[in-house]
Amino acid sequence: MPIKEALFWFGITIFGTGLFFMVEGGERMPFALLLTLIGFMALAYSVYAHYKPGTPNVPVWIGLLIITWAALLFDIYDRHSTRSMWYDPPNNLETIMLKNFVNEDIELDGKRFDECTFQNVTFVFRGIKPFVITHNHIDGGGHPIQIKIKKGPQFMGATLASATVRAACQSQQIPCPAWNLIPMD
């Protein structure tokens, strides 16, 4: 493969990665803009070099390869640091013990509930921080328990987990109350 064609494919990969991070938004926006600009420059140079014979072969692809690997390593690091928070909840969760909740919305993010009673409540999970619920009593008052979950991956994960738990409940392997998952913005 000629270097000009290889540079084109590296450029399009980096340009696309930058656009993906732009759409995702958030704190990675400067990184996204930089990647998009570098990818665009690589694309422009490869097209220019293709139509203008005799253009010197600048080893730009080496820099683009280094940037790609740096982005991959950053992504692996970022996922690793975020993952530990969810699989191993931090000890700094707000602890709520021996409390009775009746007819109210309960925010779950960042809280640990121990030996509480929940009666006819709606649980709200935004997916910002993990939560822990241990040794509690949940009573829907004859109605399904309402669980509001932010739309996105956390809602999809809760839907899959809900289907698995409902299957176990229907086969009477475990006793379960009825619940409804409600998507929220």
Image (spheres, grey):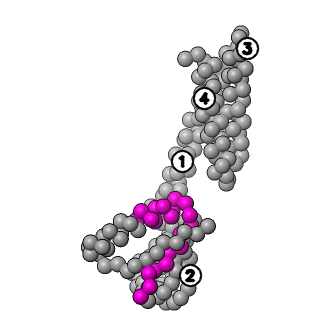
At a point 67% along the width and 33% down the height, the residue shown is 39
Of pointers 4 and 3, the one earlier in the residue sequence? 4
Residue 158 vs 72, above or below: the answer is below
| Front label number (1 vs 3) | 3
The residue pinned by badge 1 equals 77
Identify residue type, mark 3. Answer: Lys
The residue pinned by badge 2 equals 105
Q: CA distance from mark 2 to mark 4?
A: 50 Å
Residue 135 highlighted magenta (yes or no):
no
Residue 155 vs 169, above or below: the answer is above
Identify residue type, mark 1. Answer: Tyr
Q: CA distance from mark 4 to mark 3?
A: 20 Å
The residue pinned by badge 3 equals 52
Question: In front: 12, or 108?
Answer: 12
Tag 4 and tag 3, C-beta contact below 8 Å: no
At a point 72% along the width and 36% down the height, the residue shown is 37
